[in-house]
Image (spheres, grey):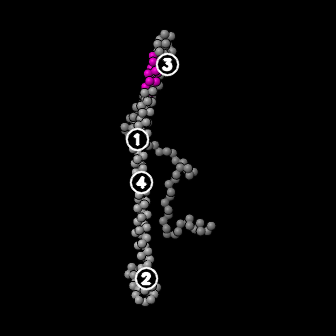
Amino acid sequence: MENETASTLPTPGAAAPAPLPSQPGQGESRPAEPQDLSDSQRRVMIFVILAVIVFVGLIIASLVLLMRAPLGEVARIRDIFIIFMAFQSLLTGLALIVLIVQLARLTNLLQNEVRPILDSTNETVSNLRGTTAFLSDNLVEPVIKLNEYLAGLSQLFAVLGLVKKTTDKKNPPRGV
């Protein structure tokens, strides 16, 4: 327990640690900063808002006009609206057909072009795995064994006194 408090206290002469930035969800909530919009984005947003306002205004105006129109006029508008909805259904069906064709083309692309690429990549990785195993078995292991035998032989000669120990200039002996 004392180690924990000692490790959290700053040491004398040490710089104070920088405060961590507060993150949402840590008890302190900051209001989201508004993102600056470019002029083109601002124009598009204003245009969309105006278009929605005009559309809602047209709907309200058409409802008011339909309420005041005679019954025969309303029937004619109803018939035109039904024709319009039938045309809209045809366009929606055509869009769905195009979507299904595009989905079929994407599926064909994935099966006939992407899958062979993935298979080729898997084959290349397995070849690479085999090559590394071959190099490890036939090159690296014999070199390591040769170094082991040479180190043992040099120690044997040093113990028998046939060869003087050479001092390593990079790492001189300590504590003489």
User: Residue at horizontal 47%, vertical 45%?
Assistant: 33
Q: Residue tagged by mark 3? A: 63
Q: CA distance from mark 4 to mark 3?
A: 68 Å
Q: CA distance from mark 2 to mark 3?
A: 104 Å
Quadrant position of residue 176: bottom left
The picture places residue 151, in percent across and down from the top left corner, at: 43, 80
Relative side of 18 to 131, left or right:
right
Q: CA distance from mark 2 to mark 1?
A: 64 Å
Q: In this picture, is 86 found above or below 145?
A: above
Q: Give the structural element (helix, strand or loop) at label 4.
A: helix
Q: Earlier in the sequence, mark 4 or mark 1?
A: 1
- Give the label, 2 or 3, closer to the camera: 2
Q: Are marks 2 and 3 in contact (CB under 8 Å)?
A: no
Q: Give the structural element (helix, strand or loop) at label 2.
A: helix
Checking the image for residue 153, the label placed there is: 2
Quadrant position of residue 152: bottom left
Span colored in magenta: 80-92
Quadrant in which the N terminus appears: bottom right
Q: Judge by depth and name the residue closer to the eye, 96 or 74.
A: 96
Q: CA distance from mark 4 to mark 1?
A: 21 Å
The picture places residue 143, in percent across and down from the top left corner, at: 41, 73
Q: What amino acid type is highlighted by mark number 4?
A: Glu
Quadrant position of residue 37: top left
